Image (cartoon, rainbow, N blue to C red):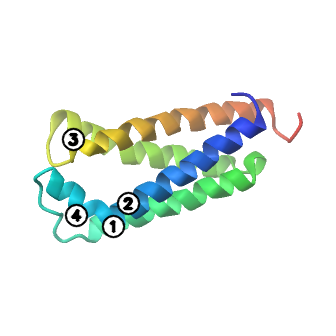
Amino acid sequence: MGTERFWKIVWLLAVWHNIIGGVGLIFLGGWVYAREGLAFPVPPVNYVRWWYLILVFALIYYLVYLDLYHSRSLVVAGICGKLASATPDFYYLTFGSGVPKLFWITVCTDYTFAVLFLLFLGYLRKHPTPGS
């Protein structure tokens, strides 16, 4: 876990995770809700914003990938984004209702990425510049 190559792979995985999730929801969101026996959110505006925010975070993760050593603030934004995405789903999947069970996947992956991003901040502290 302590190599630049490892962290480049992590950030690319984060990019693709969000691209697949965001685009997947754009095209399959209605199917996910129907599969779970839930009505698609009406009005869908907040749901649509969520799709696009997922894709904006893919861009943020790509910017970190491009410049690992000068992107600390973007990493912090990424951590906040993953926690903001996963925590309400976790709460409603555990204690409430209305969230398709399929979203356990994103809860687990988002929390995993949040931990990885935190570990990456540790890597940056030990390696403030390439090759150090």
What is the distance, in whole Å, between disc 1 and disc 3 at their CAs? 24 Å
Q: Mark 1 touching mark 2, by CB under 8 A?
A: yes
**In the rendered image, which quarter contains the N terminus?**
top right
Q: CA distance from mark 4 to mark 1?
A: 8 Å
Disc 4 marks a residue whose amino acid type is: Gly
In the rendered image, residue 108, in percent from the top left (x then y), is placed at 39, 35
Please state if 24 lies on the left or on the right of 11 as rendered. left
The residue under label 1 is 27
Mark 3 highlights which residue? 92
Residue 87: name its quadrant.
top left
- Of the numbered discs 3 and 4, the one sitting upstream in the chain is 4
Q: CA distance from mark 4 to mark 2?
A: 10 Å
Query: Which of the labelled discs sits on residue 30, or is there none?
Result: 4
- Mark 3 vs mark 4: give the one in front: 4
**Residue depicted at 53% across the width and 32% down the height:** 115
Q: Which mark is residue 62?
A: none
Q: How dense is the environment of label 3, judged by Cα within 10 Å: few (below 14), some, or many (20 and up)?
A: some
Question: Vertical placement of 118 versus 67: above or below?
Answer: above
Q: Is residue 13 left or right of residue 35?
A: right
